[in-house]
Image: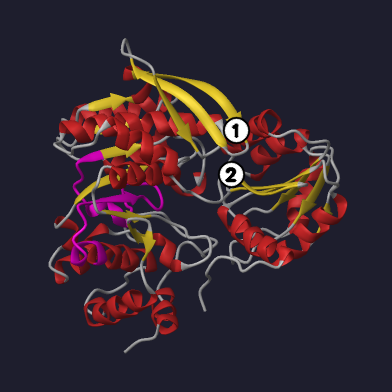
Amino acid sequence: MLTYKAALDYLYSFTDYEKKTEFLYSPEHFNLERVVRLLSLLHNPHQKFRSVHVAGTKGKGSTSAMIAAVLRAAGYRVGLYTSPHLHTFRERIRIDDEMISESAVAALAERLQPLIAQVPVLTTFEIITALGCEYFAERAVDLAVLEVGLGGRLDATNVVTPLVSVITPISFDHVQYLGNTLTAIATEKAGIIKPGVPVVSAPQPDEALSVIEMVCQNRGAPLTVADHVWEWRPGKVTPDGQVFSARRKGGPWITYHLPLLGHHQLVNAATVLTTIDVLRHEGIDISAQAVANGLAGVHWPGRMEVMSRRPWVIVDGAHNGDSAQKLAAALPTIFHYRRLILVYAALAGHSVPDMLTALLPIADRVILTRVSNPRALDPTDLLAEVQAQGRTAECVIPVEAALKRALQIARAEDLVCVTGSLYVVADARAAWYKYIGVPGPQTDP
């Protein structure tokens, strides 16, 4: 019997694109035929539950978590498949917000081993996707929400035929893989659209929406764009969450509470409300109270998450220019502080100049660091970009030391913001719990 550690070592022994600095995004490297073959050897577990499939550049994790929370509140047994994880592999595969157990990971990995041996050149993500689908099938979930890993068209999750395909806001990210125009990126995201399957889209730039509309028309997939049928307005915002009102156009306003911060989360919530409408049309019974309860109870750490209040310590997984702009706009409106101390790290492939253009103007001090990932950029390279934008910074490695340095500088009325990717958030969260002497999140051996 495999141990949990041995199972993880086995899964990570395959090609893992989350850790590779360079690769070719092509059907040769991202091949749905491989994962289809593996799933067929498992007797097609992905066909044994109903699903919601979520792609997009930003907000797909938050949107997936909200949809799953609403479905749970409606009384369904709900699987949630997301990536990457913050602290433990087990976060990626959940049922009713309960992480898969170490023993289940080990048992499934052992069961898959002889089947994996029959399918050459499988990747880590393809195997994990098959493992997650098998887990959801054997545990008889009513519905599963599957978040795309990269792109959409060639992503391993694109083997499902869902009740609804959801596309969250599209912006520039992973341009070296998906293309350097919104048309190219949207084409990859729209690759999840299936013939005749309803599609929900968040509000999109015109260039991206045109692609989605064209693909939907070609595939006979009914399209609903969130802001074409819903309207919403912000309400009171505190560091504990925000209140907003929404309605179907012409209908009565309904007030919701959302623990997630940032105006962009209202766009995600409206996309969820639109998705719920479509799911109801597909026969899924979801009451208005379940929607309100689900949104109020959603938990999605690492997204403008408050770790401390004196000083404020905020961690956020922003990793492209658009998300950095949203973060920079949100912080001064939600939090009252004297100085902002920015702790920043990035991975290869992220749009560092765009991010720093958004973040540097709000920062009084800047600390550059490096995450524990092979794709991590060296802080000295980041420093060159900071200096090119007319600012200075200090380099402190690793993230734990960078956070300690920020806290040395910070006074009680200041704000420390750690951002640049979910990987720096993970390192910072673990470092924070260690700093205050509290047991942190579960981690892998």
Judged from the image, the secondary structure of the residue bearing numbered disc 1 is helix
**Front-lying residue, 156 or 62:** 62
> Residue at position x 39%, y 85% from top?
3
* Corner quadrant of residue 431: bottom right
Is 304 part of what is drawn in magenta? no
Whether residue 19 can be seen here: yes
Instruction: Tell me if mark 1 has few (under 14), some (14-19) or many (20+) residues whose alpha carbon lies within 10 angstroms of its own.
Output: some
Sequence-first disc among 2 and 1 = 2
- Residue 140's place in the image compared with 59, above or below, is below
Which label sits on residue 262?
Answer: none
> Residue at position x 52%, y 79% from top?
445
Which label sits on residue 326?
Answer: 1
Tell me if label 2 and label 1 are in contact, CB under 8 Å: yes
Q: Which residue is mark 2?
A: 318
**Front-lying residue, 179 or 287:** 287
**Front-lying residue, 290 or 123:** 290
